[in-house]
Image: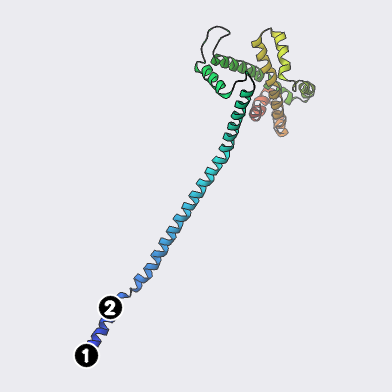
Amino acid sequence: MSATLTLGSVMSTSGDAVAGATPAPELAAELPTLSEAQLKAAADRDAQTQVTVRRRRERLSAIVQSVVPGLVGIILFLLLWQGVSQIVTNFPGPLKVWESAVKLFSDPFYRKGPNDQGIGWNILASLQRVALGFGLAAMVGIPAGFMIGRFVTLDRMTSPIISILRPVSPLAWLPIGLMVFKAANPAAIWVIFICSIWPMIINTATGVQRIPQDYLNVARVLNLSEWKVFTKIFSPPCCPTC
């Protein structure tokens, strides 16, 4: 009898232990949910890490492809330049040119006379010539382009002249400027002027001719003056093309 009780108590104790070891239904339902969420978060982190690494590699590859060929070309050019300077006498190499450039730009605004000035003064004088020539070309070319684009008869009259003079080389205009102005500075301004005026005339006239005819019909109905037509209809769309 005692043995039976002992065996039953042992079985009940082991059954309680097994029952205690078995997780509750709520815990068993929660554990897979947490593990799936963790796995999903880890997978998302891994995917983001891979995307970031791939983007960095693509960016680095693009930088290398755009920079390295240029550097290789510069190095080969310098080596070729140095080789030619070693063969040809009185031909400066890269190092000698670099030293001369450093000396030239170290004091760009010195002035020791009218013919001995720093490169800074020469650059300012060149910019002044460009500004004067380009400004004069704009003052003449833009109004002329408006007139040529506005009136068909004027366009037909000036088209052969522009077609003949526009392809002329700037070097061909320089002797004419020297002959007329008898000085180098006005001749340089003349060359800049005559080379800049043709694109301004052509672009402005083309912009005026591309304006829809409906706008001009409305202006004719409203009896607008030519000044109003130029300022209100032609000028706004044509300014970017001048």
Q: Is residue 223 visible?
A: no
Q: From the viewer's perspective, is 102 left or right of 181?
A: left
Q: Classify 225 as above or below 57.
A: above
In the foreground, 175 or 206: 175
Q: Name the residue under label 1.
A: 3
Distance between mark 2 and mark 1 Cα atoms: 21 Å
Which residue corresponds to the image point at 71% horizontal and 34% vertical from the top-left?
214
State the residue lying farthest toward the left: 2
Q: Classify 57 as above or below 117.
A: below
Which residue corresponds to the image point at 64% horizontal and 21% vertical from the top-left?
88
State the residue lying farthest toward the front: 87
- Horizontal and vertical percent for residue 190? 68, 14
Residue 61 sits in quarter? top right
Query: What is the three-letter code of the residue carrying label 1?
Result: Ala
Q: Mark 2 points at which residue?
A: 17
The quadrant of the rendering that contains the N terminus is bottom left
Query: What is the three-letter code of the residue carrying label 2?
Result: Ala
In the foreground, 129 or 60: 60
Which residue corresponds to the image point at 54% horizontal and 20% vertical from the top-left?
101
Circle 2: element type: helix
Q: Residue 41 carries which label?
A: none
- Horizontal and vertical percent for residue 112? 53, 7
- Horizontal and vertical percent for residue 191? 68, 16
In the foreground, 10 or 125: 10
